[in-house]
Image: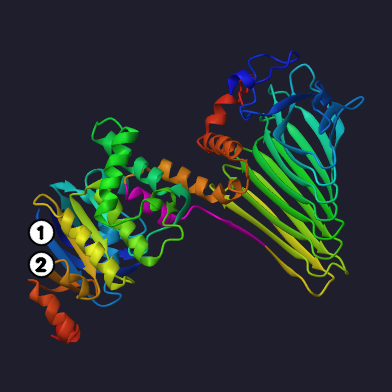
Amino acid sequence: MSQQYKYSPDIPEIFRCRVPLPGTSQAYLIKGSFRDNIKYGDKLHLYGKEPLGFNLSVTPGAVVPETIQIISVRDSGNTGAVNFVNTCVFGENSESNVLLCTHTLSMDEFHTESELEITLEKSSRVNFVIMQNEHNSSSHKMKFNVKLSKGSYLRMNIVSLHGARLENIINVRLEEEDATCELNGIYLVDGIQEIRTTVNMDHLVPRCHSNQLFKGILNDESKALFSGKITVFKNAQKTEAYQANHNLLLSRKAKVYAQPQLEIYADDVKCSHGATSGRLDDLALFYMRSRGIGLSEARLLQQLAFVYDVLEKINNEPLRNRLQEMVESRLRGEFGQCMNCSMNCC
Amino acid sequence: MLEIKGLRASIDGKEILKGIDFSVKAGEIHAIMGPNGSGKSTLSAVLAGRDHFDVTAGEVKYYGENLLELAPEERAHKGIFLGFQYPVEIPGVSNVNFMKTAINEKRKFENLPPLTAAEYLKLMREKMAVVEMDSSFSSRGVNVGFSGGEKKRNEIFQMAMLDPKLAILDETDSGLDVDALRIVAAGVNKLKKPDNAFIIITHYQRLLDYIVPDIVHVLYDGRIIKTAGKELALEVETRGYDWLIKG
């Protein structure tokens, strides 16, 4: 794995994103400025936009099993606010896998706003994983504007591991029939971290499916806001749309605000939405302890069990295992040690 | 091994155990019977250390040590095992990893090195055979999607893995069909040794056809109202509890 890791000449060599997988191609996005150019023959082209952001285009009919990894980094010395727009267009009948990681390399107060315009042409299939791991003074707002054409399929998983103020706004438009969007997220916050998630899932036409599952674990005085809305437009008959948001609060001072919303203007649909917040289950903790597993390990196992079904939805197995390890390390509090270290090795 | 004296316990101010006395010696099998709501499950939970019950009086000595002071995991390390009436599901944690964690925590307490992967697999195969468990169970999440019978077999499997000194089985027979009951009972019988002991909590006499107790206690309204030999279980089966309660 290590020999396949690509370093960037523009940031300290010691930094490495721990997510990369064998067979992935990596490209750096440093303070929004894209540094690499990746081409898979005629199948896929990833290149920088002027002045900031990237373009990813996948040729109609192209099947690219390798994961394309984009590593977005903010490092010290470039601490000002930055915003940029990236574009991804997945051509008709294409199949591709994208991994986007965001990092900060110092404790500076970074402000980043990025947008991703994602278009899935007819019958294209895309797996998109986003991993966010930033320092405790970083604010990052990411906005995803997604359009799905006829028969296309998007599976998007957002794993928010760490960051002072993360915000994800996901607007999905199911614009043509028989499109499917699977949208899943995990957020882990502690200290005084905050995370906001907004989802607008618009079913504009008949026979589309969407499924959302967002789960969060909150500790200390952290906060999470989840505002998710499914709108089923007047003609969108035979829609199936589901949304669930579940939160596990580990401390009395952690707060979650959940607003699941459903607006339906069609009459032949299957929809559900719901949100819960709860704490660790005493009986399950007791069960594990009665087998000799200590309290802190039992608490950890239960947290891992809580997010397991979301991680399970990442269908790339090595990537899923890697993210599972990172979630575990995060929940063990190991990221806390990185607080003052600029070489955030994640 | 175990001495219980004047044990009283309550939950939310409501007294459930109203003075329990009995002792268990190594090599014995005790059965505790009684109608619903008599305090059987509370007794087992208190012995295993569930902290939502308040012990208001009495003492429990385990090999001379005050058991009530110990955390549930410490009790487990010292050889106490509770088989749950309703085993808990833990999605995302495979049976293999769950038991490996449990065994290695116990070994840490005993100052033993963790088992190697090969040693662990060997032990697991051996103990799965005790309860006729299919090897596909090991990779599945703990109790996730298991039938009632499979869950109970998993409890006996876990007990076999941990090799406790004192096993408390809380209504292990509830919800079992005859085949599962036979497997569970055979598992217990195979694990019985001169230096360990069992407390079997049961509603019916049925399980006691397969596991022969040395001593039978009848618990009613938080007290043991009758203690006798195995014949008491048969008498309860034919006459019910009323004659004991009224007597």
Whether A218 is among the magenta residues is: no
Residue at 27% x, 42% y is B123
- Chain name for mark 1: B
> What's the magenta region?
A274-291
In the foreground, A38 or A192 = A38
Disc 2 element: strand
In this orientation, which residue lies closer to the viewer: B128 or B50?
Answer: B128
Percent coordinates x, y for residue A219 in the rendering: 57, 43
Instruction: Tell me the number on the disc at residue A267.
Output: none
Q: Nearer the viewer, residue A252 or A302?
A: A302
The correct choice, above or below, for B245 with respect to A116 in the image is below
Q: Residue furthest right?
A: A50
Q: Is residue B48 visible in this depiction of the protein?
A: no
Along the polypeptide, which appears first: circle 2 or circle 1? 1
Residue B156 seen from this side: yes
Q: What colouring does the structure picture have?
A: rainbow
Label 2 sits on what residue type?
Ile
Residue A241 pos. (x, y %): 74, 62
Residue where numbered disc 2 is placed: B215
* Circle 1 crowding by C-alpha within 10 Å: few under 14, some 14–19, many from 20: some
- Residue under pointer 1: B28
Question: Label 2 is found on which chain of the structure?
Answer: B
Instruction: Specify the quadrant of the image occupied by residue B21.
Output: bottom left
> To which quarter of the image does residue A78 belong?
top right
- Would residue A304 appear left or right of A175 to someone viewing this image? left
